[in-house]
Image (cartoon, rainbow, N blue to C red):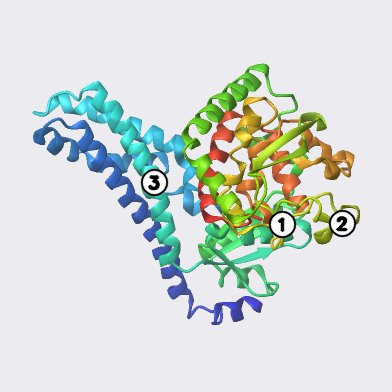
């Protein structure tokens, strides 16, 4: 079968012990690297909470308890179960872990010669543990991906759903999976003996078929991920249970006024703070643009805002001064198959412009648009009016909220996304608006911008 050629060996019993050992050490190494990261963060927190050397000794004596609490919260097992698990997903759990561990210190230290932990030191220790653990865990996962081979993965199923998950494997290399070459053949049992993970993606799935695959994967200790055929507007918001019955809970109402007020307040605070922090950087960017090419420093263009209402969007100029007049040389809007275009090698982009786009620094003037209420910090990217006029009715949902400086498109592929993929991630965002999701997208924007992939 194709899986054999991709693996470089037959899938018989002779290779199973070696493969099982590789699987064990790959996952064990990740857990140990994460535990090491937590231990370093906990040590720093213990030093912070200690006022004397004696305090530090007794605080450090409780380090094993920090690791035990992390294990009980599930901080070492989630990667094993999830097909994609990001460190940013762990922010609430890490905050709870740091809080519980510092609380344990505050409870135990008074019963030791160290004495009580001062409240201000305890608060600083909590922040230290949470922030350091977040950074060190990200580094641990980065190191783990470079120290281990990707999981050999087979996608079972045909049609759009299977193709969509294959596309996601291309967009997100942090999943650390390698698809077997060609289409998997043979029986399920033969397949599970040769791969590390099976992804079942079928538009039509029978419960019995999935149940049988679960049994086989358990027998061979192969990871199993099942892609739900419910996606887009049919996708579930939350999964709950009534006894043994799984229930998909949908939100079918508009966000509350309080949610809108919180989002607007957040936009004002972040935009004002962003302009204040980046003020020293703005003249340097303007100088670089002026030295690179002739023309205005800022580029202003009419874009479609909420409900399609036009507004003037500002950004640093990243193209030649006559880029608008030369648009017809690179693309003809009336000939586009879809109302969107992104050119990876647009000849109109300047040398400085490519750097600004890669780091998303060209978007900084849009903080002024946010303060004016025309844009939000997070939301679908504002599109040209000429393209919005070509939208079909099913595309116009993305105009139901304010456009954003960053958004789901920026963290889930940027310019590499197709129009269909872009609509899918934006629909999911719009139908699940929350400040927590905005904070997560902002946090994910930073590494994506530094990496620069998909920035056209």
Q: Nearer the viewer, residue 174 or 61?
A: 174
- Could you give the CA–CA distance between mark 2 and mark 1, rounded to whole angstroms? 29 Å
Q: Nearer the viewer, residue 333 or 430?
A: 333
Q: Earlier in the sequence, mark 3 or mark 1?
A: 3
Q: Nearer the viewer, residue 175 or 324?
A: 324
- Could you give the CA–CA distance between mark 3 and mark 1, rounded to whole angstroms? 31 Å
Q: From where the camera sits, is residue 230 visible?
A: no
Above or below, comparing residue 449 to residue 2 in the picture: above
Quadrant housing residue 425? top right
Q: From where the camera sits, is residue 45 visible?
A: yes
* Extreme-right residue of the structure: 334
For the residue labelled by badge 1, is the local secondary structure a helix, a strand or a loop? helix
The number of callouts visible is 3
- Could you give the CA–CA distance between mark 2 and mark 3, rounded to whole angstroms? 45 Å
Question: Where, quadrant-wise, is the C terminus in this rendering?
Answer: bottom right
**CB atoms of marks 2 and 3 within 8 Å:** no
Q: Describe residue 157's horizontal placement relative to residue 388 as left or right.
A: left
Residue at 30%, 43% (x, y): give it: 41
* Residue 135, numbered label: 3
Classify 10 Å Cα crowding around label 1: few (below 14), some (14-19), many (20 and above). few
Q: Describe residue 236's horizontal placement relative to residue 178 as left or right.
A: right
* Residue 332, numbered label: 2
Task: Please give the residue where the numbered disc 1 appears in the rendered image.
Answer: 164
Of marks 3 and 1, the one in the foreground: 3
Expressed as whole percent of the image width and height from the top left, the position of residue 361 reads 57, 45
């Amino acid at each position: 079968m194709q899986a054999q050629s991709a693996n470089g060996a037959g899938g018989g019993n002779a290779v199973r012990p070696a493969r099982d050992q590789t699987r064990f050490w790959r996952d064990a190494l990740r857990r140990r690297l994460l535990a090491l990261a937590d231990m370093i963060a906990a040590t720093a927190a213990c030093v912070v909470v200690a006022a004397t050397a004696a305090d530090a000794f007794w605080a450090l004596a409780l380090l094993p308890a920090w690791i035990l609490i992390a294990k009980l919260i599930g901080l070492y097992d989630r990667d094993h179960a999830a097909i994609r698990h990001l460190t940013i997903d762990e922010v609430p759990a890490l905050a709870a872990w740091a809080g519980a561990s510092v609380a344990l210190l505050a409870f135990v230290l008074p019963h030791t010669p160290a004495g009580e932990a001062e409240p201000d030191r305890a608060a600083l220790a909590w922040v230290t543990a949470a922030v350091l653990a977040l950074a060190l865990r990200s580094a641990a996962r980065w190191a783990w991906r470079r120290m281990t081979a990707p999981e050999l993965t087979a996608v079972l199923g045909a049609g759009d759903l299977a193709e969509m998950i294959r596309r996601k494997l291309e967009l997100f290399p942090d999943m650390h999976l390698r698809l077997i070459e060609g289409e998997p053949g043979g029986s399920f049992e033969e397949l599970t003996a040769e791969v590390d993970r099976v992804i079942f993606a079928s538009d039509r799935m029978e419960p019995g078929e999935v149940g049988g695959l679960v049994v086989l994967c358990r027998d061979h200790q192969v990871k199993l991920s099942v892609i739900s055929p419910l996606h887009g507007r049919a996708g579930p918001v939350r999964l709950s249970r009534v006894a043994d019955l799984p229930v998909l809970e949908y939100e079918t109402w508009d966000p509350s006024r309080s949610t809108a007020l919180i989002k607007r307040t957040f936009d004002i605070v972040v935009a004002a703070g962003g302009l204040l922090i980046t003020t020293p950087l703005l003249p340097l960017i303007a100088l670089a643009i002026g030295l690179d090419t002739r023309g205005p420093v800022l580029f202003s263009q009419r874009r479609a805002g909420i409900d399609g209402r036009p507004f003037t969007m500002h950004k640093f100029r990243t193209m030649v001064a006559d880029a608008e007049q030369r648009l017809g040389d690179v693309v003809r809007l009336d000939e586009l198959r879809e109302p969107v275009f992104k050119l990876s090698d647009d000849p109109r982009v300047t040398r400085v412009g490519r750097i600004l786009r890669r780091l998303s620094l060209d978007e900084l003037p849009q903080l002024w648009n946010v303060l004016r209420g025309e844009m939000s910090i997070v939301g679908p990217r504002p599109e040209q009016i000429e393209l919005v006029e070509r939208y079909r009715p099913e595309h116009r949902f993305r105009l139901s909220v304010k456009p954003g400086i960053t958004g789901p498109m920026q963290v889930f592929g940027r310019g590499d996304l197709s129009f269909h993929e872009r609509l899918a991630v934006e629909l999911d965002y719009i139908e699940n608006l929350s400040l927590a999701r905005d904070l997560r997208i902002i946090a994910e924007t930073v590494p994506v911008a530094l990496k620069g992939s998909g920035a056209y």
